[in-house]
């Protein structure tokens, strides 16, 4: 993908259906533990990955929770 | 920590719930333990973001961690009945502290900075690629995107898109300045992005599914 497309993608966000910020927070702990178990977290919480791709604040919280819970 | 929940002969999450729902000294101890847990999570988050806050004194950052843990404790206790056991209790509780700490850190990092909502911020995007090096196609695409932002978005959608997507203002900072919520702003951003994609696709600059 070209740098232009990367920039455009960042501006326009993901196209896949995604959960809201509220749903993301609601199920973030479940999603993270499924990831840590090696389960298909996206299948169990559809739309979470697209939301994390599009929302930097929720993405930061996901990264932190994953690191903290995985210790 | 007063009680080693992970070493109890019952499920640690159940042990947390039972202790937090008990009375007297046992409940007080459990609340103190929970506060310790949340404070560790808040400090962890602040440690991760410390580089972006090098201008803030360590004492102030620790105050932020304590405030985040305090508010997270209130939230966890208020929502205890919402815990359904989909994760460990500690993972569920951590997310409240990470949210509180993250919001405080983003707002502290932008304290005193102006949030630009106006289309004048467009040049910041254009300048990333000097015109001489940009292909005609890139320039046309940029012009069409600018036009769509200017003409096809509502004023509120335009403000939110410019601030969040173009100027990379943290969503919690914008939510505070506009007296709204992260969720409401993200919904507006999502609607704006959908509209822009549709416009770019209609003009032939983007495939509908890209």
Image (cartoon, coloured by chain):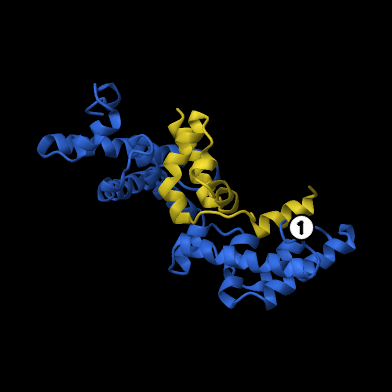
**In x, y percent, where is residue B157?**
58, 71
Residue B97 lies, with reference to residue B150, above or below; the image says: above
Q: Nearer the viewer, residue B54 or B191?
A: B191
Q: Residue at x 69, y 78 (%)?
A: B151
Q: Quadrant of residue A17?
A: bottom right
Relative vertical location of residue B91 with respect to residue A8 in this rendering, above or below: above
* Residue at image point 44% right, 67% down: B180
Q: Residue furthest front?
A: A43
B21 sits to left or right of B134: left
Asked if A38 appears above or below B108 in the picture, the reply is above
Rendering coords of residue B181 (x, y %): 44, 63
Q: Residues within 10 Å of mark 1 (few under 14, many from 20)?
A: few
- B76 on left or right of B102: left
Q: Secondary structure at mark 1?
A: loop
Tell me the blue chain. B
In percent of width and height, residue B69 lies at 33, 44
Q: Colour of chain A?
A: yellow
Q: Which residue is mark 1?
A: B128
Residue A60 in view (yes/no): yes
Mark 1 — on which chain does it sit? B
């Amino acid at each position: 993908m070209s740098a232009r497309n990367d920039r455009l993608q960042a501006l326009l966000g993901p196209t896949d259906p995604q959960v809201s910020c509220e749903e993301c927070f609601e199920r973030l702990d479940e999603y993270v533990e499924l990831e840590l178990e090696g389960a298909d977290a996206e299948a169990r919480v559809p739309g979470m990955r697209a939301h994390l791709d599009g929302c930097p604040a929720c993405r930061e919280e996901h990264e932190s929770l994953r690191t903290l819970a995985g210790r | 920590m007063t009680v080693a929940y992970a070493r109890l002969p019952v499920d640690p999450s159940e042990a947390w719930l039972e202790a937090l729902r008990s009375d007297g000294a046992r409940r007080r101890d459990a609340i103190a333990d929970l506060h310790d847990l949340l404070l560790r999570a808040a400090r962890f988050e602040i440690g991760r973001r410390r580089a972006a806050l090098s201008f803030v004194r360590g004492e102030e950052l620790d105050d932020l961690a304590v405030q985040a843990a305090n508010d997270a404790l209130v939230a966890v206790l208020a929502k205890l009945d919402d815990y359904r056991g989909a994760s460990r209790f500690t993972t569920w509780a951590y997310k409240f502290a990470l949210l509180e700490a993250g919001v405080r850190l983003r707002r502290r990092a932008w304290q005193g900075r102006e949030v630009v909502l106006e289309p004048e911020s467009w040049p910041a995007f254009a300048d990333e690629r000097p015109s001489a090096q940009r292909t005609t196609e890139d320039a046309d695409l940029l012009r069409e995107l600018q036009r769509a932002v200017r003409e096809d978005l509502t004023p509120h959608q335009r403000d939110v898109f410019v601030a969040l997507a173009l100027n990379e203002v943290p969503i919690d900072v914008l939510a505070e300045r506009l007296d709204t919520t992260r969720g409401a702003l993200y919904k507006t951003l999502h609607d704006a992005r959908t509209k822009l994609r549709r416009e770019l696709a209609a003009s032939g600059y983007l495939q509908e599914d890209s």
